[in-house]
Image (cartoon, grey):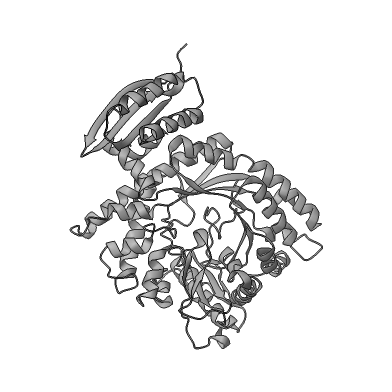
């Protein structure tokens, strides 16, 4: 059966240091969320990561996923934002 | 990738740094099915209906905040003007309805419920009279109920009996809430050309032309516009307008998304988005700051009305394309105590009540959250209301007064209402009396709608 995609954008911002990408992606994999695209930049010393994910395969609710990612972001001392893609689509695409 | 990293960061920083939010989701509920000649039975029906229809408004709003990462600051309810129900009451009071609305709001976690209202542009019915006589009591014995009265329109003229009565009620409400600096008046609006689908408090009510229930959305965003204009000194007016239009489009588009989704989840039709820039006392979330970034040394200096006219128009032009249905008040608000920049302009001597009045000719919505000396006579308050109403009547726009004669305070004192209502200086009002004029009685006839000069 074709599951309807539920695209969620995960953005991570913080001071650059080793292990951020690894820590974040591990937590995403643990929740069985599928990463479809990744864009990462170091802007001056700011680590900026954006991932397009499909949430339809997740093993937890959206709220639980946000809490899990929040806990990981606190360990890594970065900020993580998890938002449905519609908010970006509505703002930036006609 | 569907979006660039820059686009995503722009959206995130609008919320995190520039205080962008959805100001309100307002659920309008028609109360006509609650009619009863017994006010207490009617109140019980009102409570039951409001709790039933709006049961999921707060949980749905919270879900959407998480889903989109955009705060929805207020969850509100508007209802049919209570005067419509009051006409049938045997006992001449509508206070039990206000109490029922307050109880329902508290149970549901709703911030404010509005519609303790009457529409009297041309005349006053028995139901209107009962409502008017209940306003001061209702505002003082409830926490979350807001009241508004429409005393004029471009079609009917201005009901000057209504204006004078409202000035008395404003004074009474201030005196009765003396221990809270006249706070009851912050929940009371006097309108000319009131609209039926306004999602913003305190002047919201569910118009008789609306459906059984409806969902209206009010956006915020002065901080985002301000950030966009931060490096704009080199732009000419055309370019400046473009910047504001683009940012307004994005802000409104987010409101459209939230409104559509909330409507789907609640099973309540989506009414309108109100294209208003609504400031808050938070630093940077100020209309005044935007005007000063446009090139004014201080808000209130000559040029302010032109700057505000341009800002208001550009916000609408950008927003209209983003919204399926625009409505409500749709204009930049300039509530004085709620806008820290406005308060600074007053304290600097740049902005006075006369200039504020001029500014209301070109923007939404009127003399809003204006604190005046507690000993201002009823006749002067009636004069201020009549002036605002005249601006609305002649210019076919909504105007309003939310005046707070703060008991015991004089011009220059500072009053603090707390929270979103903010704090600000008491403004000086004119010293000469319009008593003979405002006491004439009757109605100012409707104006001609041609020969527009």
Please say whether residue A85 is visible from this viewpoint: no
Would residue A9 appear left or right of B147 to someone viewing this image? Answer: left
Would residue B55 appear left or right of B48 to someone viewing this image? Answer: left
Image x and y of residue B56, in percent: 61, 39
Would residue A67 appear left or right of B170 to someone viewing this image? Answer: left
The residue located at (30%, 31%) in the rendering is A49
The residue located at (49%, 28%) in the rendering is A62
Q: Is residue A17 above or below residue B93?
A: above
Q: Is residue B376 above or below residue B369?
A: below
Which part of the image, by quadrant, shows the C terminus of chain B?
Answer: bottom left
Image x and y of residue B130, in percent: 72, 67
Q: Is residue B200 above or below residue B449?
A: above
The residue located at (32%, 56%) in the rendering is B226
Please say whether residue B297 is visible from this viewpoint: yes
Tell me where residue B99 sits by quadrant: bottom right
Outermost residue to the left: B234
Would residue B328 appear left or right of B79 to someone viewing this image? Answer: left
Image x and y of residue B374, in percent: 56, 79
Outermost residue to the top: A1
**Labels in figure, total:** 0
Which part of the image, by quadrant, shows the N terminus of chain B?
Answer: top left
Nearer to the camera, A1 or B13: B13
Tell me where residue B137 sits by quadrant: bottom right
Image x and y of residue B164, in percent: 61, 77
């Amino acid at each position: 059966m074709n599951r309807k995609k539920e695209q969620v954008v995960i953005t991570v911002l913080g001071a650059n240091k080793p292990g951020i990408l690894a820590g974040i992606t591990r937590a995403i994999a643990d929740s069985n969320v599928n990463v479809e695209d990744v864009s990462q930049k170091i802007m001056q010393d700011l680590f900026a990561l954006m991932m397009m994910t499909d949430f339809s395969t997740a093993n937890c609710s959206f709220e639980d996923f946000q809490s899990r990612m929040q806990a990981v972001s606190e360990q890594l001392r970065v900020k993580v934002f998890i938002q449905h893609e519609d908010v970006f689509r509505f703002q930036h695409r006609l | 990738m569907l979006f660039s990293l820059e686009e995503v960061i722009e959206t995130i920083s609008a919320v995190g740094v520039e205080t962008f939010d959805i100001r309100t989701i307002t659920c309008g509920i028609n109360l006509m099915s609650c009619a009863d000649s017994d006010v207490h039975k009617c109140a019980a029906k009102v409570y039951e209906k409001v709790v039933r229809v709006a049961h999921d408004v707060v949980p749905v709003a919270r879900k959407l905040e998480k889903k989109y990462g955009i705060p929805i600051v207020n969850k509100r309810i508007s209802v049919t003007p209570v005067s419509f129900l009051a006409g049938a009451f045997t006992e001449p009071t509508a206070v039990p309805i206000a109490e029922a609305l307050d109880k329902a709001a508290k149970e549901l976690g709703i911030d404010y419920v509005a519609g303790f209202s009457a529409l009297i542009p041309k005349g006053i019915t028995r139901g209107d009279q009962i409502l008017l006589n209940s306003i001061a009591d209702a505002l003082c014995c409830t926490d979350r109920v807001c009241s508004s009265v429409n005393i004029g329109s471009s079609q009917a003229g201005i009901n000057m009996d209504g204006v004078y009565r409202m000035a008395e009620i404003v004074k009474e409400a201030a005196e009765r809430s003396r221990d809270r600096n006249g706070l009851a008046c912050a929940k009371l609006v006097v309108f000319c050309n009131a609209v039926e689908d306004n999602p913003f408090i305190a002047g919201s009510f569910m118009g008789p032309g609306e459906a059984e229930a409806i969902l209206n959305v009010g956006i915020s965003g002065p901080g985002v516009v301000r950030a966009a204009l931060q490096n704009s000194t080199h732009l000419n007016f055309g370019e400046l307008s473009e910047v504001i239009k683009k940012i307004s489009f994005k802000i409104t588009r987010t409101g459209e998304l939230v409104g559509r989704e909330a409507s789907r989840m609640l099973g309540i039709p989506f009414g309108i988005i109100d294209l208003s820039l609504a400031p808050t006392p938070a630093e940077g979330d100020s209309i005044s700051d935007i005007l000063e970034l446009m090139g004014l040394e201080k808000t209130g200096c000559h040029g302010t009305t032109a700057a505000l006219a341009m800002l208001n128009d550009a916000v609408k032009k950008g927003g209209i394309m983003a919204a399926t249905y625009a409505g409500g008040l749709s204009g930049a608000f300039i509530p004085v105590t709620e806008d820290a920049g406005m308060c600074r302009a007053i304290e600097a001597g740049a902005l006075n009540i006369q200039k504020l009045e001029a500014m209301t000719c070109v923007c939404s919505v009127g003399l809003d959250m204006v604190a005046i000396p507690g000993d201002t006579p009823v006749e002067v308050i009636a004069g201020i209301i009549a002036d605002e109403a005249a601006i609305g009547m002649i210019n076919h726009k909504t105007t309003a007064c939310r005046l707070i004669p703060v008991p015991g305070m004089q011009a220059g004192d500072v009053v603090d209402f707390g929270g979103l209502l903010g704090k600000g200086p008491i403004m000086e009002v004119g010293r000469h009396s319009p008593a003979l004029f405002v006491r004439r009685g009757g109605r100012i006839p409707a104006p001609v709608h041609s020969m527009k000069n």
